[in-house]
Image: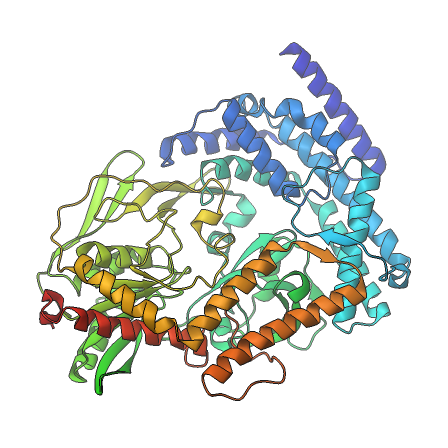
Amino acid sequence: MLRHLLLFSAIVCYSFTSLANSAKVQVLEPAAEHALTNRAVVHHLYQHHYSRKYLNDAFSEKVYDRYLNILDNTRSYFTAADINEFKSMRLELDDAIKTNDLEPAFLIYNRYRQRAIERLDFALLLINKGVDHFDFTRDESLELDREKSVWAKNSSELDQLWRKRIKNTVLNLKLASKKDQDIKELLIKRYDSQLNRIKQINAEDAFQSYMNAITYTFDPHTQYMSPRNSENFNINMSLSLQGIGAVLRSENENTIVERLVSGGPANKAGQLKPSDKIVGVAQDKKEMVDVIGWRLDEVVDLIRGPKDSTVRLNIISGSGQTETHKVISIVRDEVKLEDRAAQSEVLEIKRDDKNYKVGVIDIPAFYADFEAKNANDPNYRSTTRDVGKLIKELQKDDIDGLIIDLRNNGGGSLAEVNNLVGLFIPQGPTVQVHYSFGHTQVLADQDPAQLFKGPLVVLTNRLSASASEIFAGAIQDYGRGLVVGSQTFGKGTVQTLIPLFRGQMKVTNAKFYRISGESTQHRGVIPDILYPEIYDVEKIGESALEEALPWDKIAASKYNTHGSIIKVLPGVREQHNQRISNNPDFAYLNEQVVFLKELRGDTTISLNSKTRESERKDMEQRRLGLENKRRVAKGQEPLKELTDDVADTDSAKTDKEKDTAVDALLHEGGEILVDFMLTQPNSSLVKLK
């Protein structure tokens, strides 16, 4: 231990001296209150978190790896020599955590800060030479996915990596028709901005990064928030942008769109999509501000603004050779309850010269106007109330069955999902909540009344999460209807806020379980009939998150099933498969899935301009060919070129009536519902109508 302390002391002296001399910025040091906060964070993790961890070498390794990943997940700053110098800490962080010793964490952070300043200085030096010195005729390439790359041997190797990264950025801008001088000015502003931000980092930033390396080791939804972030915790918890309605995350110095808030301005505009990168933000007609390398909360602050004002976003869609740049405008507004409210329509499905009416209720979120409810307003709005009214209206139209559309529904009120399930079952349990202290709470519908008794289909996709998964799981467990679509998100954990004397914590303290005893966590709900997966499941969903709590089971609740779905399901699946084998939209979706997997798997990009342009044109021609194949099969005129209003199946558009691919999924849901009714005409489910 003494040898380790002496070695550690030497490393601290070397690192701090090196930083002070070369970078001329103040060395960050932990404050006394940080040690006390460290103690409080660890205490609450062990008191309240759902899972149990041991402060041992295995835990130390995970914290160490997560901390390096937070600071340098693209392996673009640290060198192999740095990592070799840190390696003695890999198995020592558990001891440091126990004794509230933050020196190892600050040592690593100060070294990261030093390396980041060196890299940005190099970038500015390179850009100041002018972009015309880059040779785009050379046959060289850049690996975009560096999370598992080996650490650079030395600064010279990092110089080559950064030269290629900057060259790639310049080439992208050139292909977007930017002039050399404009590119130079843009990149100088970008790296100057990043350099200033690195120099402004304070001890609180370093401490929060380290605390979140610890909390993430428990699970990705557990988080420490510093006093600054706690003041605005609604933004930092949900990362929702007040004004445009989007959920963002930070990845590799980029701000990525995670999902859109139903009924929000961005959702209505239909131009912003999940997985888009926001690289610039401008207020109305003012100059665009480059935000690459910015902290997420700073980007949030820039996008927020007064209602009815306009924000312009410079976004990049796609990746590698398929990147497309464009600037969109969104008028800021409040996300109103009526904009997120459930809506209905009627689909007509023709079968053997007979028309069947299928009611569709689209539920964007599980909402409730709690203020109006608490004020005893008899007309307060809620998901269950609105859906109940819509069902009664559809029943007046004499519908033959009902589709509940939960695609892109990120969840919401637990009470509302419990009540909504109650509209479709006589009575019984709906979901189990198992807490960290061992207690299991069973939520149930106590009302024996059943508003809708007819055939039911629940439509899901990868963005159906939390409360949506509870509803779909309950309907599936009861055998009350068919779940159709894509595997859901897998968010089956519950978080609680714990105030600290400095900041606060969000801690996962419970998990949701279906009445069958199966968790919705990690695995989500597997539909009875699966659609092609149009989302990148390696990037979107609980299973894409490291340290996500696992799927498991507890004891089942007591409940009675309501039909013989298992008996009719094979026949319904067979009819579905036969039908989509000749369906142009499904053929297009399947081909797009294959195409997108190929693109995602190709993480090396050419830095030769002719090669890049050729690859880009090839990709565009392939996309155009796939689109025209679908159009010709549907009797439509082929396109000469792709435009922005052509359906992009990598991310389902929000306006379902405009997107034929999404319409096809909904229409097939109607076809499946009719199959469900007709496969077993004597089924108790059909008789319930």
Which is more toward the observer, 164 or 428?
A: 164
Q: Is residue 624 left or right of residue 678?
A: right
Q: Compared with residue 564, is residue 34 higher up or lower down, i.e. above or below?
A: above
Q: Quadrant of residue 84?
A: top right
Q: Is residue 350 left or right of residue 29?
A: left
Q: Position of residue 589 (x, y in %)?
A: 47, 69
Q: Position of residue 569 (x, y in %)?
A: 23, 61
Please identify the quadrant where the N terminus is shown. top right
Count of marks placed on residues: 0
Which is more toward the observer, 378 or 319?
A: 319
Visible in this render: residue 245?
no
Q: Is residue 493 left or right of residue 220?
A: left
Q: Position of residue 178 (x, y in %)?
A: 79, 72
Q: Quadrant of residue 664?
A: bottom left
Coloration mode: rainbow
Q: Residue at x 84, y 37 (%)?
A: 22
Visible in this render: residue 356?
yes
Q: Compared with residue 578, is residue 227 higher up or lower down, i.e. above or below?
A: above
Q: Position of residue 597 (x, y in %)?
A: 55, 59
Please identify the quadrant where the C terminus is shown. bottom left
Q: Is residue 3 left or right of residue 161?
A: left
